[in-house]
Amino acid sequence: MRGAGPFGSGGICAERQALAEIRLQNLHKNFGDFVAVRDIDFTVDDGEFFVMLGPSGCGKTTTLRMIAGLEMPSSGQILIDGEDVTWNRASQRDIAFVFQLFALYPHMTVRRNVSFPLRLAGVPRREVKERTEEIARLLRIEHLLDLGVGGLSAGDRQRVALGRAIVRRAKAFLMDEPLGALDAEFRDVMCEELRLLHDRLRSTTVYVTHDQVEAMAMADRICVMNHAEVLQIGKPAEVYSRPATKFVAGFIGSPSMNFLPIGEAVPQGSKSVIVNGSEIQVPETLEGISHPRGFLGARAEHIVMSDGGALRGTVFGVEYMGARQLVTVDTAAGRLKLRAPNTVRVKDGENVGLDFMTDRLSLFDGDTDLALQTRERR
Ligand code: ATP
């Protein structure tokens, strides 16, 4: 799928954008006594689609604004392509910023909106025309070029805003919830288009969202934040299957991971834990939990209904989802959600046994929230 799609070839697409690795070193931001971003350290590789994901208020936008030069850090450094730009003005950084609430110039046509940055930079008229039309082709708004922006749909307005952001061939794109104003169906379409556009341009992109589905669909790597801190950086599959903390495990995935309280210390080298009196096999622990506040984490697709079952419970509800069904089971260890093929017959109120796929399970320390290191999965 990637690499093909609706976007044309040649011109701006064939032309590789300028190199831009973005490095943040111990970046910190206070607003008075309040810490909005705490000692963040990461490198966005040249050409990477890097998504910053986290709940509202965790510091994503503040970090993005510091990269853009719209907010000055309290301490730390920002390097773009090896050059320290920490104290450079936004206009000196050659970075394009796309906000959610895109402000198009209402009195201008689509053409004049898209070409605005080029005209401002004094690009010759013929080149302005060529590049504007090329971007319009890329974003499939060619037929709208000579219309005013007032009557456009939300999606077309978003495309015009994107066109205006990318026409300039900036070193990198920073996007702050650019799809947030769109309805769910159109957001899916734009998600895919944005990713295809990125595969064409290969420009370094830092994309902020609180929507984990968007992040999983688009990112080369996801940076999960909470309370001003980075909790984990990894490929979508890594943060999904090997979450570094209980927060990450709960934030990523729908439904979120099931957590079962362990209720006793877990020594290093354990191969099983006791959950509410039942023994459940787990991957061998390479470190222990010294107190009784640990959690066993299991994704819905890693719990299987069986006649025996390590744990038993009563079916609370069944949601049909086409090929699969999502079954909610109340157990003495709490309410669990599991995915089962739709060929499995199950009904509300039924008593069922549950087994867990040992090598897929995670263990979390209830005090630190951190995932325990376990022996490599088979
Ligand atoms: P959202 O998606 O809601 O914008 P976010 O993760 O992007 O969330 P930020 O906008 O970076 O979060 O804000 C982080 C914290 O810093 C929030 O608690 C916010 O209220 C606070 N904050 C941001 N800007 C300022 C400011 N100029 N003055 C004081 N506090 C601020």
Image (cartoon, helix red, strand yellow):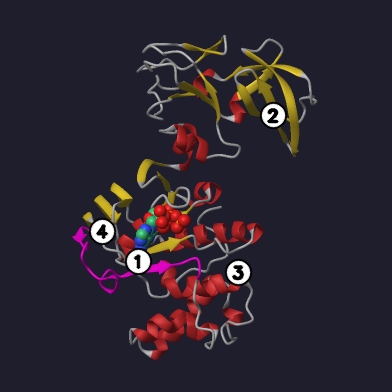
Q: Residue at image x 44%, y 36%? A: 238
Density class for disc 1 (Cα within 10 Å; few <14, some 14-19, many ≥20) is some
For marks 4 and 3, the one nearer the N-term is: 4
For marks 2 and 3, the one nearer the N-term is: 3
Closest to the observer: 174 or 318?
Answer: 318
For marks 4 and 2, the one nearer the N-term is: 4
Instruction: Indicate which quadrant contains ligand 1.
Output: bottom left
Query: What residue did someone put label 1 on?
Result: 17
Label 4, label 3: how far apart the Cα atoms are: 34 Å
Give, as a three-letter code, the residue at label 2: Thr
Density class for disc 3 (Cα within 10 Å; few <14, some 14-19, many ≥20) is some
Q: Position of residue 347 (x, y in %)?
A: 80, 25
Label 2, label 3: how far apart the Cα atoms are: 37 Å
Label 2, label 1: how far apart the Cα atoms are: 49 Å
Label 4, label 1: how far apart the Cα atoms are: 27 Å
Query: What residue did someone put label 2 on?
Result: 328
Query: What residue did someone put label 3 on?
Result: 155
For marks 2 and 1, the one nearer the N-term is: 1
Closest to the observer: 223 or 238?
Answer: 223
For marks 4 and 1, the one nearer the N-term is: 1
Residue 158, placed above or below residue 267: below
Residues at discs 2 and 1 in contact (Cβ within 8 Å): no
Report the disc number at residue 73.
4
Give, as a three-letter code, the residue at label 3: Gly
Closest to the observer: 136 or 237?
Answer: 237
Label 3, label 1: how far apart the Cα atoms are: 25 Å
Q: Is residue 260 left or right of residue 84?
A: right
Which residue is at the far front?
33
Report the disc number at residue 359.
none
Q: Residue at image x 30%, y 47%? A: 38
Can residue 41 be seen here? no
The mark tally for this picture is: 4
